[in-house]
Image (tube, grey):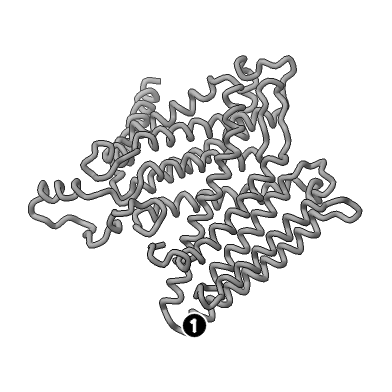
Amino acid sequence: MWAASCLASCCAACACDACRTVVSGISRRSARIAYCGLFALSLIVSWILREVAAPLMEKLPWINHFHKTPDREWFETDAVLRVSLGNFLFFTILAILMIGVKNQKDPRDSVHHGGWMMKVISWFLLVIFMFFLPNEIISFYESISKFGAGLFLLVQVVLLLDFVHGWNDKWVGYDEQFWYIVLFSVSLVCYVATFVFSGLLFHWFTQAGQDCGLNTFFIVITLIFVFVFAIVALHPAISGSILPASVISLYCVYLCYTGLASEPREYECNGLHKHSKSISTGTLTFGLLTTVLSVVYSAVRAGSSTTLLSQPSSPRAGAGKPLLPLDSKPDEQEEKERAKPVTYSYSFFHIIFSLASMYSAMLLTGWSTSVGESGKLVDVGWPSVWVRIVTGWATAALYIWSLVAPIMFPEREF
């Protein structure tokens, strides 16, 4: 017994030391990835609690205070929303604290890059505290999360535009026939997928014998955008490229699909209502994957002066900086480093994670509504439909603006 107790104490001490070592090993350069890891941890915790927390939450009187115990799905949704709220508050507090940080001499710069043991503990305590809040607060957070999720979709669009333009510029920059062929092939595949997907949308969401004019309108408008993208991108005055146009076209059709698939299951024009479970699993997997890729991409690209995260006057991160300091005067070198301006907006960086927390909650709950007063779970419906459809239209507007803005305002840099 004594030996087992000693062994347990040693294991606990080793685990704490290992955790402390990992946290203390996070440097300035790896801090952005560490935030991504913390966000990924929140997704894992949400997914686990969605599966296992319902029996425990049924026994908590401040959560299950209803005359009739709600369905298991209600508790699963509530658990995800509570973890999401804790994650949202954590990153929102950091975003507020980081407002106005201009250079590395600001004490808040060290808060952004360091103190990871305290950050992890604070995040953990915030998530636990969320399970002691009344249902009304969680219901209110769920309501505003739909709009926050829509804003994150717009952030995804900006990141996607930055990615596809960079992708296109890199391949065109090679100025070789092989890369032009590859560029054309990828564009062709994207356009074929776009039109095949559009045909499936007509098949799934315009049922024969039903008045499905609204669904037809959504699909037709999306296809009009597809043709407008190609015409504008290939216009001689624009000198655009077909690759970004094809990728954005496919993304717009995908957003149209997610919007139509969110229509109420009893809606006669929703042809997927009989297969809603399998469809939602695929949508969930793809949605979570794009969410993680978006936040990782925003973190990795945060040091570039070409992205939306960067300060206008900031230098390109890592430019002319050796991986290891070789200066014989480390104190002087450190002082110079601290005097440098920050390479991206810390506040906006954390806002992306706050919005991503809302969006991931909507994905994990299927855009459902947890109603604290009644204990009933409202199915996916029209608010989520319009959020996604309007996001698709905003995507089209942003892409067209990225093409015509340099022509309309040649004196400005885009």
Is 368 located above or below residue 297 in the figure? above
Is 13 located above or below residue 234 in the figure? above
Q: Position of residue 367 (x, y in %)?
A: 65, 39
Which residue: 64% across, 54% down?
Answer: 255
> Which of the two residues, 141 or 288, is positioned nearer the viewer here?
141
Secondary structure category for the residue under label 1: helix
Tell me if 89 is positioned left or right of 366 in this view: left
The quarter in which the N terminus is drawn is top left
Q: Position of residue 356 (x, y in %)?
A: 51, 43
Which residue: 44% across, 30% down?
Answer: 124
The residue that disc 1 covers is 178
Is 286 located above or below residue 408 in the figure? above
The kind of residue tagged 1 is: Phe
> Which of the two residues, 385 or 401, is positioned nearer the viewer here?
401
Q: Is residue 343 visible?
A: yes
Residue 262 quadrant: top right
Q: Position of residue 93 (x, y in %)?
A: 40, 32
Direction bottom: furthest residue:
177
Which residue: 65% across, 23% down?
Answer: 372
Which residue: 64% across, 32% down?
Answer: 77
